[in-house]
Amino acid sequence: MKDTGAPGTLGPMNEWPEGWSDDGRGTRYGRGSAQPQPEGARVMRQVRHGQAGHGGYAGPGAPAAQYGGRVPRQQPSYVDGQGHGGGYGDDGGYDSGYNTGQVYGGSGAGGGGVRPRPNWGRRIKWTAITVAGALVVTAVGTYFWADSKLHRDVDLSTVIDRPATGEGTNYLIVGSDSRAGLSDEQKKKLHTGSAEGKRTDSMMILHVGDNGDTLISLPRDSDVVIPTYKGSASGKVYQGRGRHTKLNAAYAEDGPTLLVRTIEYNTGLHIDHYVEIGFAGFANIVDAVGGVEITIDKPFKDKYSGADFKAGKQKLNGEQALAFVRTRHAFAASDLQRTKNQQKFLSALAHQVATPSTVLNPFKLYPTMGAGLDSLIVDKDMSLWDLASMFWAMKGVSGGEGTSMNMPIAGNAPNGNLQWDMAKVKTLVNELKNDEKVTVSGN
């Protein structure tokens, strides 16, 4: 084909690169160089589809006759410049990034686009919201689950002639010898015996206030007067006749409400909340927490409780712990030493439950909570917050942040019971009522 020089016509064939020819299949996509060396760097041209009647390498308006009377199929043509069309055509086709270096295009219509960078701030925000929501749901569910397990069986509103309330909160914590829930095999293993009913094995007053918490053990052999009281079951009022008896006899006579009434009458201190736990519950809590570590000062044995301990630091399981807090026959001052052991162990138990290995481990925390809550008997006004306050106060006492003591004893009463030192008791009660730092020491 000869170069006519006319605009829009094809040039000489020898201007095409080697291997390129127009063999009737239409024009090709580019214009190379016949030189043996590659061309120098230049701006990549934009690819554009030709319009009808503007096919191949012909200029605008080239007649179809130049192609043998047929209109060539539409082929893309190179267009220099910074046109706004996209890729193969002016209508925003494939991509306009060939002359800007953005080979994979932007977000224009029809463009593949580079994958957008992750919005980490947004992801972190929604992850935090999801985690916080899950924690709230778990916390609320745990609260209602735990609250449903409390046995609110004691109605302190039936207690008559009560002293005025003071500052702070006073808890009466009772360990009973109830065998409820124990099989014959468990009774034998725990050395509990098979006595019917239940009696108090331990009694403590825990005062929680702003000037330090105080844990006071009340020996069960304490000499007290049974006052006038209202029967918990009958509702009948029984007149007091100045009858002296051991403190634990009040519980045996008419249960928790008479015990509260007797303590309030003999001390003048208002009891705000009542908490009771039996043998089985106590042992189950110790086992659920994985045992409690304690240091025993002197070795002792007691065939009645099953105690057989060596001196030194050791971890007690539920069976051993129950024997430890119940032992009294191995000591000369039986009841007083037992109350000291009970305080020591309960403080160690509270400390053990509050460790991260328990609190942060749901496989240990929930069984511990379940074992404890299932076995507790509390008053009708006791909330989980009250129970948590009591627990943390006991933990504080074990850590040296409060005072742990026995009720001050003056000696033995004529009937052989332990006689309180009433002068010291009066001072102690006044300090507790006013939420003052306790200055009285016990036995």
Image (spheres, rainbow, N blue to C red):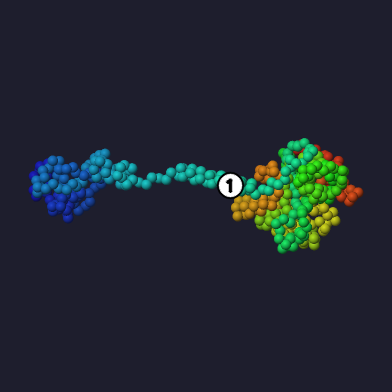
Q: Is residue 89 above or below residue 21?
A: above
In the image, 287 versus 397, the foreground residue is 287
Question: As drawn, is 202 to the left or to the right of 417?
Answer: left
In the image, 305 versus 75, the foreground residue is 305
Question: As drawn, is 2 to the left or to the right of 278?
Answer: left
State the residue at coordinates (15%, 50%): 26
Quick check: can you spot residue 55? Answer: yes
Quick check: can you spot residue 425? Answer: no
Amino acid type at circle 1 is Gly
Residue bearing mark 1 = 141
Q: How many marks?
A: 1
State the residue at coordinates (33%, 45%): 113
Counting from the top left corner in percent of width and height, residue 30 is at 20, 48
Counting from the top left corner in percent of width and height, residue 184 is at 72, 62
Which residue in the rendered view is the most extreme toward the right? 414
Q: Residues within 10 Å of mark 1 (few under 14, many from 20)?
A: few
Counting from the top left corner in percent of width and height, residue 442 is at 82, 46
Counting from the top left corner in percent of width and height, residue 20 is at 16, 53
Q: Is residue 387 above or below residue 310?
A: above
Mark 1 residue element? helix
State the residue at coordinates (58%, 47%): 141
State the residue at coordinates (23%, 51%): 38
In the image, 239 versus 336, the foreground residue is 239
